[in-house]
Amino acid sequence: EVQLVETGGGLVQPGGSLRLSCAASGFTFTDFWMSWVRQAPGKGLEWVANINQDGSDKYYVDSVRGRFTISRDNGQTSVSLQMNSLRGDDTAVYFCTRDGGTLSAADLWGQGTLVTVSS
Amino acid sequence: QMTQSPSSLSASVGDRVTITCRASQTIISYLNWYQQKPGKAPRLLIHTASTLQSGVPSRFSGSRSGTDFTLTISSLQPEDFATYYCQQSYITRTFGQGTKVEVK
């Protein structure tokens, strides 16, 4: 089955760290860019970061650059998001997505994992 | 930056619904449309402005005029009440603010 499954969400204190993982299956992982998209409670979608097929190109939204790091393990067909210096406005459901290419839409989404930043 | 309008609309089954998205600079045709229902992940409807994603009903269509993009639902069905987002994929990625389609 073609799917993405995110894990790693939870409650973390402001200033803390969390690592999200996304396991991909059912397709040729190395053919695709991968992204993380988040959605704060009751709010719209915000693209967070993406990574190319071999991990050599990475891009971030300004609000997370320098705090978050996207990476991938092609052997394990997984993509991760290391989140440091977390703030309250990072509270959101984080979705992992598959992108066809550098200019492509997200044609496959995971179910999302909730990150709550609170003391 | 993507400016999506309206932020919400009320419609009835069978209505023709139009949602627009304006880009602040050229994005060529790298504009995508998604549908999201409460508690669910978004679903890709249309990519590159007007190409229907596989499995999406033909009542959904997209068009482009310069930096203005339109999503049209030709005859609204009960399962179409949801929130719709545009997204540009030309310069990294940016989503519009969303349009909630509600029952009139």
Image: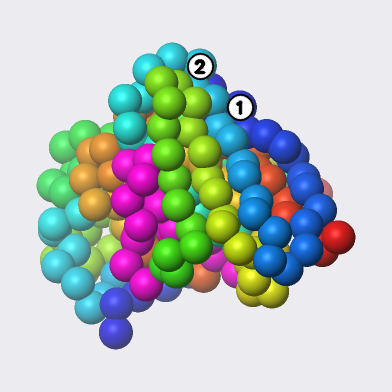
Q: Quadrant of residue B89?
A: top left
**Chain at numbered mark 2:** B
**Chain at numbered mark 1:** B
The disc label shown at residue B84, or none:
none
Q: Is residue B41 magenta?
A: yes
- Give the SS element for disc 1: strand
Of the two numbered discs 2 and 1 on the same chain, state the one appearing first in sequence.
Answer: 1
Q: Quadrant of residue B81?
A: bottom right
Task: Please report the residue visible at 44 percent of the width from the left and 58 percent of the height from the top.
Answer: B45
Q: Classify mark 1: residues with Cα within 10 Å, few (<14), some (14-19) or many (20+).
A: some
Residue on which disc 1 sits: B3
- Give the SS element for disc 2: loop
Residue A19 visible (yes or no)? no
Return the residue nearer the eye: A3 or A5.
Answer: A3
Residue A37 is situated, as x and y percent measured from the top left of the image, at 49, 48
Return the residue nearer the eye: A33 or B87.
Answer: B87
The stretch in magenta equals B37-55
Task: Please report the residue visible at 36 percent of the width from the left and 24 percent of the height from the top.
Answer: B27
Residue A46 visible (yes or no)? yes
Residue on which disc 2 sits: B24
Q: How many marks?
A: 2
